[in-house]
Amino acid sequence: MDNFQYVESVLHVEEVPVPKIAAAVGTPFYLYSAATLGLNFTVFDQAFSGIKHLTCFAVKACSNIAVLRLFARLGGGADIVSGGELRRALVAGVEPGKIVYSGVGKTRPEIREALKAGILMFNLESAQELGVVQECAAELRVVARISLRVNPDIDPHTHAYISTGLAKNKFGIPTEEAMEGYLAASALANIEIVGLSCHIGSQITKVSPFVDSVAKLRDFLVRLAAAGIVIKYLDIGGGLGIRYNQEEPPSSAQYGAAVLQALGDLDCVLILEPGRVIVGNAGILVTRVIFTKSGRQKFIIVDAGMNDLLRPSLYGAHHGIIPVIQGGRGREVADVVGPVCETGDFISRGKEVPVALSGDLLAVQDAGAYCFSMSSNYNSRPRVAEVLVNGRDFHVIRRRETYDELLRGELIPDFLMDKENRVAKNDQQ
Ligand code: LLP
């Protein structure tokens, strides 16, 4: 990507040398390029310029409020899957009327919050959920705009954990049952049917599964219209893959053209929920080598672990690794591992990586999507910083967690207190 390049052997993001940021914020940290984020969003959005549409960024891919604000400024909406993501989207300034709420297990408090905010629509995934949304809307004396998420039983040919549109996956309502669902919804006083939605998976590298699912949705729309149910919004989900290694995914433009062709002359507002394709290549994880070990096997032990970047451990995902400063030392096969006490804690295993020495900085590529957002505090490791580069400037958009923040919210109950502490505590009361 143009915004991540070497200048005199030093990796820069836009115009900022990465070692400068490492010196200021410490390691590890996630580093995003505002220019790449903006460009990816715009290119994707323009691929649908031939039709009325709304690009709702999938918040789960990269949830930082600064990143969400950037897309909101470009006219984007948000695809959310929890009350926490709703809060983030609202704080970031996403218009409530541009928020769609997906997910199989929305709770009543979450549904109420979204109703109060006045979101565009709920993508419902079961008859029970429809009933609960009706009840919550009636309590609040509002009308809930809904779509049903259908499960088209299409194989997206991706990792089994991120395939969502097969009959055996937990998501959506089988297309055969969806008509019944719409008829039930149309009889409910506090429900307004506005949409039809679908999402078949993530990191999809061919257009054919998307085209097949759009064709199924179009057929279903025709049946709905015949039953007198008019659909304003057709939400075809996210899922477009990116190149991590050898993959050759379609470009946003190719994807857009294929979708528009499959839609034909359908008169709906198209909703898209892209995540990875917008943020994936716009971020790196910068980590420092702590030690190296070279016995029977070569290990490069870095300060970022599986808690900071889970994808390799969870999905066997590939992320390229490059040196932050090119030292001319070449590459060799080694395992790049973190400090977490698990053998499954690796960032790269059995592949060629830069020859690295203790103290070197490494950049883990394509770490903008589902990396920071999936990080955890496992092994009581504070969450790392996130930094956004904008031209010549860099901005910390999330401070590294402190140990105090790590322990915030934890309490030792009275019965476990030492006598002196109990007395001291009682004195304070
Ligand atoms: N809409 C819905 C309803 C989704 O479930 C997802 C992703 C998206 C949109 C965005 O999909 P995207 O355009 O990013 O492919 N943690 C996994 C990815 C999980 C994706 C789950 N759903 C990973 O690291 O590969």
Image (tube, helix red, strand yellow):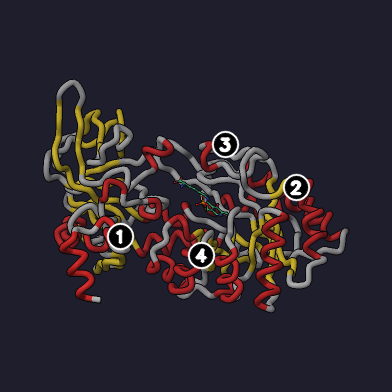
Apparent side of residue 207 relative to residue 407 in the rendered image (left or right): right
Of badges 1 and 3, the one in the foreground is 1
Residue 261 visible (yes or no): no
Of badges 2 and 1, the one in the foreground is 1
Q: CA distance from mark 1 to mark 4?
A: 29 Å
Apparent side of residue 370 relative to residue 428 in the rendered image (left or right): right
User: What residue did someone put label 2 on?
Assistant: 175
Q: CA distance from mark 2 to mark 1?
A: 51 Å
What percent of the width, then of the height, locates residue 185? 77, 63
User: What residue did someone put label 4 on?
Assistant: 83
Q: Secondary structure at mark 1?
A: loop
Q: Is the Cβ of the residue at disc 1 closer than 8 Å to that at disc 4? A: no
Residue at screen point 74% across, 55% down: 264
In terms of image quadrants, where is residue 22?
bottom left
What percent of the width, then of the height, locates residue 116? 58, 76
Q: CA distance from mark 3 to mark 4?
A: 30 Å
Of badges 2 and 3, the one in the foreground is 2
